[in-house]
Amino acid sequence: MCSSAGGTGSCPPDERFDRSTCSASRCRRLGVVPPFVRHIRFTDCQIQRGGLFMPIFNTPFSKAYWKESLKSFRSLRGMVFAALMVAVCVAVSYLPGIPVTPGGRTISLTFIPRALCSLVYGPVGALVFGAAEDTLSFLIDSGGYPYFPGYALTTMLGCFTYALFFYRTRITVTKIFLAKLLTNIQNVILGSLWASMMGGKAYLFYFWDSAIKNLVTLPGFTVILFVALQALVPIMQKMNIIPNQLGGGNRISWI
């Protein structure tokens, strides 16, 4: 603990830190930092105490952020949660899709478990999760289509994007909208390319159809993702799966 036997209020060099009783903020005020958080630059993040020391970052452009992401990727908790989200994605894919165009085009709600996994598992784990989830979903039900790795790449990139906006950072409505916007753009550009390569038609033939679908679904799916995160993130915080990533009153702020 952060006090000596003589009550001087300092942490002797040879005294072991107790993670359950020594808060990083108190040790920082006393001029010392516990060994298990020394690698984190306090200028890059804020330390949150929720059973585990999980930092909150203002930006992913820091060395500490990627170290934390790699740590999450290696953690048993992250692996188990990712496996659970793979199962949820497979289950959701069997639900009827939401119709979005007169031609019968539908879209699935698998983006919700993908976003949740990226929120917990981080950008490094999100890449592995995306590849595993897409491949496993194909093996379970290919729909009669041949396997094409391009779609796995699209899923990986989408999960990676969600992680950059949601992992170990404050979750806001703006970030939710930007994350969904970027993933929709990726679906349009890459999805049209893969469809052209497999279908044999011109790229623009698939591009405009996909662009209309993703433009129509953007507002509604942003709201759905907002509702899902607002409902589930407070529960995940209480379970110490993630740090406190919401604003005042445990609500998602606008900016």
Image (cartoon, rainbow, N blue to C red):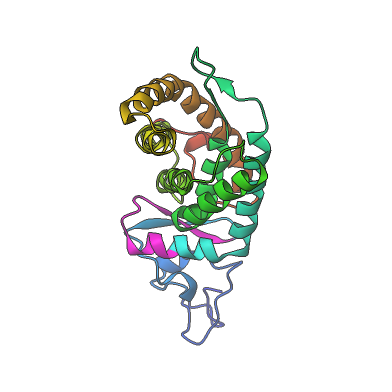
Q: Nearer the viewer, residue 63 or 35?
A: 63
* Viewer-proximal residue among 201 and 21: 201
Q: Is residue 30 above or below residue 150?
A: below
Left or right? Give the position of 54 relative to 165.
right
Identify the residue at image location x=46%, y=51%: 168
Is residue 65 at all visible to an observer of this figure?
yes
- Could you say where residue 253 lies in the image, as x and y percent from the top left? 44, 33
* The N terminus sits in image quarter: bottom right
Q: Residue furthest bottom?
A: 14
Count the marks: 0
Q: Residue at x 65, y 57 (%)?
A: 80
Figure quadrant of the C terminus? top left
Of the pair 6 and 160, the residue shown nearer to us: 160
The percent coordinates of residue 126 (x first, y second) are 49, 52
Give the residue displayed 47% in from the left and 27% down from the top.
222
Q: Is residue 23 visible?
A: no
Magenta residues (range): 52-67
